[in-house]
Image (cartoon, grey):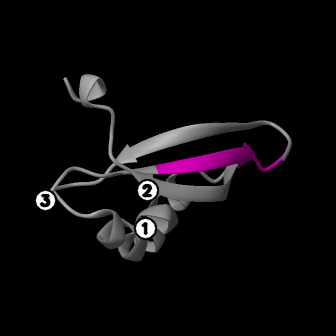
Amino acid sequence: MELVALVLTVCLASAPDRCREETLPLQGPGSLTQCMFRSVMYIAEWSEQHPALRVKKWRCKRPDVGKLI
C-alpha cells in the first residue's frame, strides 16, 4: 500500500470567498478508497480544531514524493 493525503479546500467562516487548500497526510499506508471512507472522521476532527474555517470540499491523493522528505 502507498501513502495517501487528504486535501481539504477550506474557507473562512466569516468570509466564505477566502479559501485555501490544506493537505493532511494520513497516518500509515492506505489506498485512495480507504482514504475516501476514513475522510469523514479526519475532516470532523480537523474542523473541531479549526472552528474559524469551513471545509468546502475535499479529495484524496497520493502525496508528492518530493514533499515527503
- Residue linked to disc 1: 39
Question: Which secondary structure dominates the residues rendered in magenta?
Answer: strand
Q: Secondary structure at mark 3?
A: loop
Confirm or deny contact between disc 2 and disc 1 (CB under 8 A): yes
Label 2, residues with CA under 10 Å away: few <14, some 14-19, many ≥20: many
- Residue linked to disc 2: 60
Q: Residue at image x 84%, y 47%?
A: 16
Indicate the amino acid at tag 2.
Answer: Cys
| Chain-order first, disc 1 or disc 3 | 3
Label 3, residues with CA under 10 Å away: few <14, some 14-19, many ≥20: few
- Does residue 32 appear to the left or right of 30 in the view shown? right
Q: How many marks?
A: 3
Residue 2, image x, y percentages: 18, 53
Q: Mark 1 or 3, which is nearer the eye?
A: 3
Magenta stretch in the rendered image: 7-15
Indicate the amino acid at tag 1.
Answer: Ser
Q: CA distance from mark 3 to mark 2?
A: 14 Å
Give the farthest residue toward the bottom.
37
Q: Secondary structure at mark 2?
A: strand
Label 1, residues with CA under 10 Å away: few <14, some 14-19, many ≥20: many
Indicate the amino acid at tag 3.
Answer: Met
Seen in the picture, residue 62 relative to 18 is either above or below; the reply is: below
- Residue linked to disc 3: 1
